[in-house]
Image: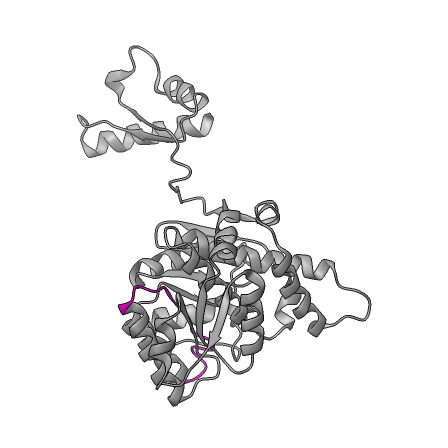
Amino acid sequence: MLGTCLENVRTQVPLVHNITNYVTVNDVANVLLACGGSPIMADEAEEVEDITSICGGLNINIGTLNKRTIAGMLLAGKRAKEMGHPVLLDPVGAGASALRTGTAIELMDTLHPTVIRGNISEIKTLASGSGTTKGVDADVADAVTEETLDQAVAFVKEFAKKSGSIVAITGAIDLVSDGETCYVIRNGRPEMGKITGTGCQLSGVMTAYITANPDDQLEAAAAAVCVMGLAGEIGWGNMQEGDGNATYRNRIIDAIYNMSAQMLDRGQNMKFDRNTLTKDQLLLYAVTDSHWLNGRTLHSVVKESLEGGVTFVQLREKQLDEAHFMERSKGFAGALQRI
């Protein structure tokens, strides 16, 4: 499944225009080459429209923001949207300063990005118009944990629906949603936080993935998150005595370079949130009505359906009023739980 997204990147070699920060520009270029894409870096307002016109996707990262590059971001973004190219916005440090916050919100509202990727604090800032960050890192108070997961899933789905963008929140637990479906991803290593720019690298990789997989950009975005996290796991496993964070950065890029579709499909640790049903799960759809039971119980009919391969069951009782339908629904849910 996810491996197909990887293979499409390797086959198509998408050219990605990056307006990214000066701290990680070299790493972003190298990781794009490693994943199978092709990078071009340009932020001068006089040329960004020409550059983005020859590319397949645009990656905008506000990590080292200045007024000159803001103009370039807006011009490139508008041209990319005119051409139907996917646009990714990485609102690095949104919430840390008024300039960053205002610029990130302006880019989001003006460009309506295909994907918005950031940490939980940055995304909350975009959602509320203000927030707090630890520099360019997420505020500890915002962290997505097993205890706060349901709340975080609800938030990312709501924001994705409101913004009209795929939203990827990355951290110890990663969330990727289009407002309906939400992928919950648990790949990666905590040591990745000791490297400057793993998020910036991911934004570059994700832009390549959504560019090469236009028919399923949600899955492509999730695949990119899994690739980066799995590379962190593989890279850490290859560390030797005396290696540090500089070596770890290179091992992550090497792991992406050497990753195959089979490795990704075997190593990905991705699940749907429990309130999500996707088209891949709706393999056989059953509708049941008390008029169709022919003397059997609802429990037995549902049990037989599930044993026969049904993955989605709808209770249909058009003759009941709301109160009686709710009562019947509780029994229906109880039957499913018993099965």
196 sits left or right of 163 in the view = right
- Residue ID at (34%, 67%): 113
Q: Main secondary structure of the magenta part?
A: loop
Q: What colouring style does the render use? A: one colour
Q: Is residue 95 magenta?
A: yes
Q: Is residue 329 above or below residue 58?
A: above
Q: Is residue 138 magenta?
A: no
Task: Determine if residue 54 is in view.
Answer: yes
217 sits left or right of 292 in the view = right
Which is nearer the eye, 143 or 147?
A: 143
Which is nearer the eye, 267 or 256?
A: 256
| Residue 100 percent across, percent down from the top left | 41, 82
| Residue 247 percent across, percent down from the top left | 71, 71
Q: Is residue 59 above or below residue 286?
A: below
325 sits left or right of 144 in the view = left
Task: Determine if residue 152 is in view.
Answer: no
Q: Is residue 106 above or below residue 258?
A: below
Pick out the residue farthest to the top.
295
| Residue 262 percent across, percent down from the top left | 60, 45
- Residue ID at (56%, 66%): 33
- Residue ID at (54%, 63%): 171
Residue 162 falls in image quadrant: bottom left
Pick out the residue farthest to the right.
241
Which is nearer the eye, 301 or 310?
A: 310
Provide the residue span drawn in magenta. Answer: 82-97
